[in-house]
Amino acid sequence: MSTDIVDSTGQPPEVPGPFGAPVPTGEAGVTLRADTLNLFDSTVVAVSSVAPAYTLAATMAVLFATVGIGYAGPAVIWISFVPVLFIAIAYFQLNRKDPDCGASYSWLSKLVSPYLGWFNGWVQVATSVIFCISAPLIAGAYTLQFAQERHWISASTANDLGYQAIVAGLWLMLITFICIWGIRWTTNFQWVLLIIEYVAVIGFSIWGIIKVAVKHPAGSQGFHFAWLNPFSISSFAALSAGLVLGVFFYWGWDTATNLNEESKNATKTPGHAGIIAMFLLLLVFAINIIAAQMLLPEKAWSVHSGTILLYFAQQAAGSWAGYVMLIAVLSSTVATTQTTLLPAARITLSMARDKVFPSVFATIQGKLKTPAVGTLILGFIALFGILLASQVASIDTLLNNLILSIGVLIAFYYGATGVTCAWAYRKVAFQSTRFFFTGVLLPFVGGVVLLLVMADVIKTGGWSGSYADIIALLMGIPLVILARLTTKGDFFKVKPIAYTEIGD
């Protein structure tokens, strides 16, 4: 792999990273278990991180209501796919030059500004922690709902926020244990969960489409190409909000990149896995939303908004299908919580290696080769958040607000990474026509679109609708100043570098 990289003074950096890529001085020394994940493993992790069953259960009804004319949902899915795919390409281009488990945090620090990089790392960790609060709560609710369906507990017990928080905490502790125990255990567990949710979601979607075509149930309708038309969305504000939800739909494929130091062929496998995952996810989301819109009458989307995916499965195949989809959503929720905790622990590991985060996060457990202490700390923070969230009167409102907030924060760090990729390769942008598009233009366009969408949603929502995002972003400013004042190493003094070759 080429390492022909210079900083703004024209001199090469002094310290090589673990794969030959130049990094700030404080980063060398701590290693994870290398050469463990192949392309299949990485793709499984990338797709599991997005967790289609969980995402559809938590967001599909919200998307239907957000875009105004609800049947424009498929249009939002493919429109949001485009800029996020461009970001996946940016991740591939940046990772093949510098595979660091900090990924976006590390790249922004070295290529643009260490201050912006640290801020970006904070946003990613904050996003992950918020999600690790909301997702286990859904897992707890679905677990108790399944127990109620089996007549093991009463309806009052199943709907009790306290019991839901207890079960959510138990799920989070199990997930944290598996993450600590090792990347191989984590990936094997993901295979099982992925099979369950994909068989359920794709199977019932195809079943629903066939049922509409053959039996024409009351309230059903045939497929309309107008559903794919973005101009059917009621307003630009609805489009922006829909795009933020769409970004949330696809969020998670970049987990494969955060596991690059544990992957075989670390410069290429994670990036390829992310791009492959994006196309698989487009297929799954599109077919399910189209099938649901064909089978379910419009009023069902509001009446059954909280359980729309379960209701769809029951309407497609019968009451027994509801049990299967319950298990699929539960397994999907557990999977995505696990694969959100994984990258968060590795981002904080990378920041701690650079001596800009508490050193305890850089601790690697000897035989397991995992950031055990950092994973445990993040798990406890999320557990504390679950306890606080259980005191909220309307948990459904809280979860919907958290999902929209997460989408805005994702748009920020995805967008920043896309623009960074274009900036990093500015000196070699015209060495190849193909690379100009894949390494510069497409990442830049994807990044700018997501940043504009983020800004528009915050502006439209104001303080009342965007307070979680505003707080998370504003908190990063004093924290990065504190990191600068307390850092004794050279991290904040290293000048940005620029790539002078395209790479492998």
Image (cartoon, grey):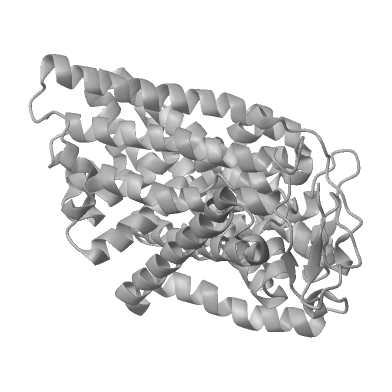
Q: Nearer the viewer, residue 228 or 398?
A: 228
Asked whether residue 202 appears in the rendered view, the answer is: yes
| Residue at 26% in and 25% down | 314
| Residue at 41% in and 67% down | 454
Q: Is residue 269 above or below residue 401?
A: above
| Residue at 81% in and 78% down | 9
Badge count: 0
Residue 236 image position (x, y, % from top left):
24, 65
Q: Is residue 99 left or right of residue 301?
A: right
Position of the C terminus, as image quadrant, is: top right
Q: Is residue 101 above or below residue 171?
A: below
Q: In the picture, residue 422 is in which quadrant?
A: bottom right
Asked whether residue 395 appears in the rendered view, the answer is: no
Q: In the picture, residue 303 is in which quadrant?
A: top left
Q: Is residue 281 left or right of residue 90?
A: left
Q: Nearer the viewer, residue 13 or 138?
A: 13
Q: Is residue 267 above or below residue 385?
A: above
Residue 420 image position (x, y, % from top left):
60, 65
| Residue at 32% in and 62% down | 240
Q: Nearer the viewer, residue 154 or 89?
A: 89
Q: Is residue 326 left or right of residue 40?
A: left
- Identify the residue at the far top of this view: 214
Residue 152 image position (x, y, % from top left):
42, 27
Residue 188 image position (x, y, % from top left):
67, 27
- Identify the residue at the far left of this view: 218
Q: Is residue 350 left or right of residue 16?
A: left
Q: Nearer the viewer, residue 375 or 232?
A: 232
